């Protein structure tokens, strides 16, 4: 069986085992357990860790075997002279330690980068979860309006049967019911789409979750978390760049080689041994290019960290101001409009039953109530979006 079909079967099995009703914390935990994208991102850490093996390896010695034979003139070496040589490089500049430090720093960079990607994904899950909650609430509002309209139809039909109302009123409210039913169908379809969107980012295709909770306002943080994934990643990048500078400098230190040679002659028979040390002269190449590049990377990483800190501070200030403004707008709307809904409903029904108002006024009141509830839902969703922006700037996950 191929790898891809096996993965599809595993994901399908995970989707069927996932709960139908989930909270935001459960959705994030499912992502951490089942997301193939998260697993692929974290695999980069293993790739970086493989460099640690390479960093700790000693350079290979060189073994040589040669033979010399006189082919012309006077034989001065006894016909044949075999030679066996061994050259062993000796790292005297702490290269292995510096390379290992740099490799560890690169592992930290990979780990921080994976954490940053995970934080972005979890923020996206929170956004999709809030969108699903809003879609579910919209369906609920419209379904409630449809139920109210059907209840009012009984009143209208009763008055029409009693001769106190017209057939037009029944037809008019039936038209309103049909329109509301269509909006409920549309809202239900949108809710299903938002559930699929959440399943996509969680990493469970085929799962259709129902979100638990509400869009109630939270108490977002007011300061940037020092452990913000973006800041951690930039700090790891800067540390890695400094480790690369040390490694480049160590690699520029000449590596001497201890040489050992032995050769023999056949006529007269004998053996000779020579030993020595060879050292490259760093007259031209002292690894200046790698050192300069590492220093430039360290400077870039320092500037990147400062830029990220500044951008997060600006984003937090903007998002905090927007969240406050949207919470204030929601509070004003609730105070000015929502508290009047029950009164408007009662007055519209009473007016219609008493004959002082017609079907148009009754349906107008029903539409106004529905639109007010939908508007309140839009404002709550806007508050949730703004507070998510605050969380993104302050926590990054």
Image (cartoon, rainbow, N blue to C red):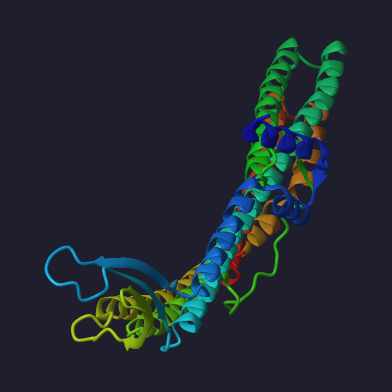
Residue 45: name its quadrant.
bottom right
Residue 161 drawn above or below residue 219: above
Residue 359 is left or right of residue 64, and the answer is right
Residue 150 is left or right of residue 393, and the answer is right
Whole-percent x, y for residue 174 in the image: 73, 17
Residue 299 drawn above or below residue 338: below
Whole-percent x, y for residue 261 in the image: 37, 79
Q: Nearer the viewer, residue 42 or 282?
A: 282
Q: Is residue 320 visible?
A: no
Whole-percent x, y for residue 348 in the image: 76, 35
Q: Residue at x 84, y 18 (%)?
A: 159
Q: Residue at x 79, y 45 (%)?
A: 342
Q: Residue at x 42, y 89 (%)?
A: 92
Q: Is residue 175 visible?
A: yes
Which of the image's four quarters has the N terminus? top right
Whole-percent x, y for residue 268 in the image: 32, 78
Q: Nearer the viewer, residue 188 or 352?
A: 188
Q: Nearer the viewer, residue 25 or 230?
A: 230
**In this view, which residue lies farthest toward the front?**
268
């Amino acid at each position: 069986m191929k790898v891809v079909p096996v993965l599809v079967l595993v994901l399908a099995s995970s989707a069927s085992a996932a709960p139908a009703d989930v909270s935001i914390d459960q959705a994030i935990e499912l992502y951490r357990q089942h997301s193939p994208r998260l697993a692929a991102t974290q695999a980069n850490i293993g790739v970086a860790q493989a460099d640690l093996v390479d960093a700790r390896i000693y350079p290979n010695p060189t073994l040589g075997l040669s033979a010399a034979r006189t082919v012309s003139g006077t034989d001065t070496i006894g016909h044949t002279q075999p030679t066996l040589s061994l050259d062993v490089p000796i790292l005297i500049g702490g290269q292995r330690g510096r390379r290992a430090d740099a490799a560890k720093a690169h592992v930290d960079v990979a780990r921080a980068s994976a954490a940053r990607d995970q934080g972005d994904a979890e923020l996206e899950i929170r956004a999709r979860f809030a969108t699903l909650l809003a879609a579910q609430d919209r369906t609920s509002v419209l379904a409630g309006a449809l139920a109210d309209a059907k209840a009012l139809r009984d009143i209208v039909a009763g008055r029409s049967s009693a001769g106190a109302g017209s057939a037009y009123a029944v037809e008019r409210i039936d038209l309103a019911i049909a329109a509301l039913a269509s909006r409920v169908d549309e809202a239900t379809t949108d809710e299903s789409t938002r559930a699929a969107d959440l399943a996509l980012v969680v990493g469970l295709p085929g799962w259709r979750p129902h979100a638990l909770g509400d869009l109630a306002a939270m108490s977002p943080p007011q300061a940037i978390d020092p452990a913000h994934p973006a800041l951690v990643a930039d700090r790891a990048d800067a540390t890695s760049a400094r480790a690369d500078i040390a490694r480049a400098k160590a690699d520029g230190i000449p590596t001497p080689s201890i040489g050992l040679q032995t050769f023999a002659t056949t006529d007269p028979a004998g053996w000779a041994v020579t030993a020595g040390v060879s050292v490259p002269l760093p007259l031209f190449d002292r690894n200046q290019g790698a050192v300069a590049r590492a220093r430039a990377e360290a400077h870039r990483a320092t500037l990147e960290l400062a830029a990220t800190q500044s951008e997060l501070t600006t984003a937090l200030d903007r998002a905090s101001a927007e969240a406050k403004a949207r919470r204030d707008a929601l509070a004003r709307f609730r105070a000015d409009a929502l508290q009047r809904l029950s009164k408007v409903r009662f007055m519209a029904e009473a007016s219609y039953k008493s004959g002082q108002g017609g079907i148009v006024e009754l349906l107008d009141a029903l539409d106004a109530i529905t639109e007010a509830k939908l508007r309140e839902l839009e404002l709550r969703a806007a508050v949730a979006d703004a507070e998510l922006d605050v969380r993104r700037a302050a926590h990054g996950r």
